[in-house]
Image (cartoon, rainbow, N blue to C red):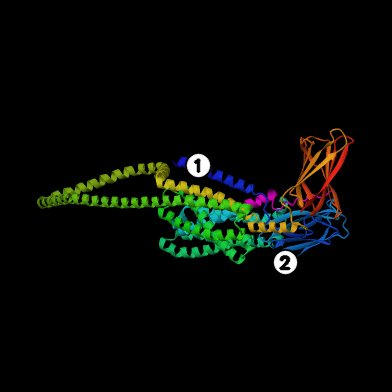
């Protein structure tokens, strides 16, 4: 049975880790946690004169450097000057060169939000009128690329290492003190410490490139590392390393002095280790709470302690589960996990789940703000997935509790049977001793009588002869022993080393056979086998849950995303409120040639400022679609002297042309002109006005 379970265990763990890595890989660059809520000039606006500066406003505090805000002219040349200046941490502006010519300008920004995540974006505005050439408004790759992927893996490993370190130590102290001497449990906790330490160092080195250029070569830039150390996130990572040094001392005592103490002495040391371990664990959790989501936004003073409790509860549950799983599958046969230890962990995990529900509910309300954010934002969708995984995990944990109860009952019944067997054996031994006592007494009495009769009737010569016989026997024995001693020494010298090696080898073989037999007997227990399977299933779901949690911490909170959408919607229009539907314009045309008559229909969706989709259909007077050699569209707003803005639609199918991303800079009354050419020399331009909101 053991030979079949172990490969399945390894295969399942590898599959779950692969799924977690795939989930992390699909996360992409870190989403913006501080959203752009305002700008001057606004996105897509057309201003009469060139502004003296460009200003940006974010939903929360951000940090900038000298190259965070850039303004490019239509040819891609920078027209900003000086470093960005800010007010209050949420608004920053950069000055522009004087006398900028007309055309479309591109604003790009890359900043770091107060919750440690990079934020990047871009938009355009025009001076005088939009130009024919513009710079691509794609944002910089903040938090993406190979460095971003490494940073995401480092975050996942740090969370996993924290959970294994804290949860494994809690499992030993609170549930199974004798587990401090089990090698596999020691390896689990030490592996958690090593993973968290290595991931923290990796994050510290990657931080500068992650929030900046995204180049792998900048990882070893000492100047960039010095700048990182001056940030809130850098200070949190350094503090985590210092606390890990204290955690190393805690682990050394737990698996050193604590393991060597007797049970009574362990009770006294347990209290000190529990207090010290709780302080270190809370400090490690605070390095996340003080530098990420909980440190900014609504009720930060309450959110940070709640986040610390949430992280410790997750670690106690999932890390303890990892230690229990390792002990059940890889623990020595002579030191199995007792049923009472599993029962104590079940109660500890139940308390952790209660803490998770309370703190998780508060965090969900704080980060979402509305029920619609569950489905309308990516953060809410990931949170729903996390809640579903926690529900599955709790369901599997319920099955584990049932197996634990059955294992405890079976163990108690086994103890009772063992006690009854011992009592029966004791009674049997007493009966056997009672039956042998009379026989021995009668024999002693007979020997005593024979001895007394012999001494009374024997003569002195008999005594002397007896003495001589004893003396002769002694001499013979001495001569035989003398002759055999030399041969005994020689044989002992030649066979001593070989016999000792064979004895040691036989002892090892017997020990291995006994251990295998004990392990088979242990694994044959159906209750323990069922518990192992349920705990393995819990650990599998926990791996995916931890991956979802890692992605969730890199996603823009739903409350921030909805506020940004609301602010953007209210500030995007400069005149009337935006319309919600498409505008359809039917324009008859006649080029004067044969088959030169028809109707051209233009559909503009959603017919408001920003990007629009344009569809154009050409039909004969009877309604059938037909193709023409060429069709062109131009948009003009005469009131603001904007345009004509040319649009070159692509031919899709018979009588159908389309263009996407048609930019309309401002709202108002726009003239839509369509030029239709039906032959080499026959063409006509027809137009209609449309209200674009």
In the image, the segment drawn in magenta is 133-154
Q: Gap in Å between the C-alphas at discs 1 and 2?
A: 57 Å
Indicate which disc residue 88 carries. 2
As helix, strand or loop, the secondary structure at mark 1 comes to helix
Above or below: residue 599 compared with residue 154: above
Q: Residue furthest right?
A: 681
* Front of the two marks 1 and 2: 2
As helix, strand or loop, the secondary structure at mark 2 comes to loop
Q: Is residue 199 magenta?
A: no
Residue in the foreground of this view, choosing between 65 and 616: 616
**Residue behind mark 1:** 8
Q: Quadrant of residue 679?
A: top right
Above or below: residue 600 compared with residue 236: above
- What residue lies at 58% left-to-right and 45% top-to-bottom? 19
The location of residue 469, given as percent across then percent down, is 20, 46
The location of residue 374, given as percent across then percent down, is 60, 54
Q: Residues within 10 Å of mark 2 (few under 14, many from 20)?
A: few
In terms of sequence position, does the residue under pointer 1 or pointer 2 come before the other? 1
The location of residue 350, given as percent across then percent down, is 47, 57
């Amino acid at each position: 049975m053991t030979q079949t379970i172990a490969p399945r265990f390894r295969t399942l763990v590898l599959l779950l880790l692969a799924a977690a890595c795939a989930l992390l890989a699909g996360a992409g660059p870190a989403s913006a946690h501080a959203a752009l809520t305002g700008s001057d000039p606004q996105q897509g606006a057309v201003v009469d004169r060139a502004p003296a500066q460009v200003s940006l406003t974010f939903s929360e505090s951000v940090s900038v450097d000298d190259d965070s805000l850039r303004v490019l002219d239509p040819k891609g040349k920078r027209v900003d000057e000086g470093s960005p200046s800010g007010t209050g941490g949420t608004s920053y502006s950069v000055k522009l060169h004087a006398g900028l010519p007309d055309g479309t300008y591109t604003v790009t920004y890359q900043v770091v939000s107060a919750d440690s995540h990079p934020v990047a974006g871009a938009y355009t505005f025009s001076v005088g009128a939009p130009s024919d050439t513009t710079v691509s408004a794609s944002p910089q790759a903040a938090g993406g690329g190979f460095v971003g992927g490494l940073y995401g893996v480092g975050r996942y490993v740090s969370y996993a290492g924290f959970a294994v370190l804290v949860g494994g130590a809690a499992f030993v102290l609170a549930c199974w003190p004798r587990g401090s001497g089990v090698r596999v449990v020691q390896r689990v906790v030490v592996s958690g410490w090593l993973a968290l330490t290595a991931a923290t160092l990796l994050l510290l080195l990657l931080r500068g490139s992650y929030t900046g250029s995204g180049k792998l070569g900048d990882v070893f830039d000492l100047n960039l590392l010095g700048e990182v150390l001056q940030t809130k996130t850098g200070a949190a990572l350094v503090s985590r390393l210092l606390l890990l040094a204290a955690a190393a001392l805690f682990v050394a005592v737990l698996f050193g002095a604590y393991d060597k103490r007797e049970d009574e002495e362990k009770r006294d040391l347990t209290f000190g280790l529990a207090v010290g371990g709780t302080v270190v664990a809370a400090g490690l959790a605070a390095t996340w709470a003080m530098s990420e989501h909980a440190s900014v936004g609504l009720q930060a003073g309450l959110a940070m302690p709640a986040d610390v409790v949430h992280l410790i509860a997750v670690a106690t549950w999932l890390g303890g589960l990892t230690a229990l799983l390792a002990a059940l599958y890889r623990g020595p046969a002579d030191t199995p996990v007792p049923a009472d230890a599993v029962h104590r962990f079940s109660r500890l995990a139940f308390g952790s789940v209660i803490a998770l529900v309370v703190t998780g509910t508060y965090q969900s309300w704080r980060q979402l703000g509305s029920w619609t954010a569950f489905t309308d934002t990516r953060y809410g969708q990931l949170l729903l997935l996390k809640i579903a995984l926690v529900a599955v995990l709790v369901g599997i944990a319920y099955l584990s509790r049932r197996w634990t109860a059955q294992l405890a009952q079976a163990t108690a019944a086994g103890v009772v049977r063992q006690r009854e067997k011992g009592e029966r054996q004791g009674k049997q031994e007493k009966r056997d001793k009672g039956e042998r006592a009379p026989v021995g007494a009668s024999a002693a009495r007979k020997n005593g009588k024979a001895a007394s009769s012999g001494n009374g009737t024997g003569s002195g010569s008999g005594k002397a002869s007896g003495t001589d016989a004893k003396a002769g026997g002694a001499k013979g024995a001495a001569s035989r022993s003398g002759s055999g001693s030399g041969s005994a020494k020689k044989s002992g010298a030649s066979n001593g080393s070989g016999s000792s090696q064979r004895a040691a080898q036989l002892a090892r073989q017997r020990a291995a056979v006994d251990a295998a037999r004990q392990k088979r007997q242990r694994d044959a227990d159906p209750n323990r086998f069922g518990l192992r399977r349920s705990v393995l299933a819990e650990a599998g779901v926990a791996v995916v849950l931890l991956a979802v949690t890692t992605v969730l911490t890199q996603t823009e909170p739903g409350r921030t995303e909805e506020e940004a959408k609301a602010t953007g919607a209210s500030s995007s229009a400069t005149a009337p409120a935006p319309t919600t539907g498409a505008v359809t314009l039917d324009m008859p045309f006649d080029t004067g040639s044969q088959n030169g008559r028809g109707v051209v229909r233009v559909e503009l969706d959603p017919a408001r400022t920003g990007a629009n989709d344009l569809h154009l259909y050409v039909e004969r007077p009877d309604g059938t679609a037909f193709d023409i050699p060429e069709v062109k569209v131009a948009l003009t707003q005469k009131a603001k002297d904007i345009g004509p803005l040319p649009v070159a639609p692509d031919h899709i199918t018979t009588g159908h042309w389309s263009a996407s991303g048609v930019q309309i800079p401002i709202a108002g009354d726009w003239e839509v002109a369509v030029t239709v050419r039906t032959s080499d020399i026959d063409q006509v331009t027809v137009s209609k006005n449309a209200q674009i909101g």
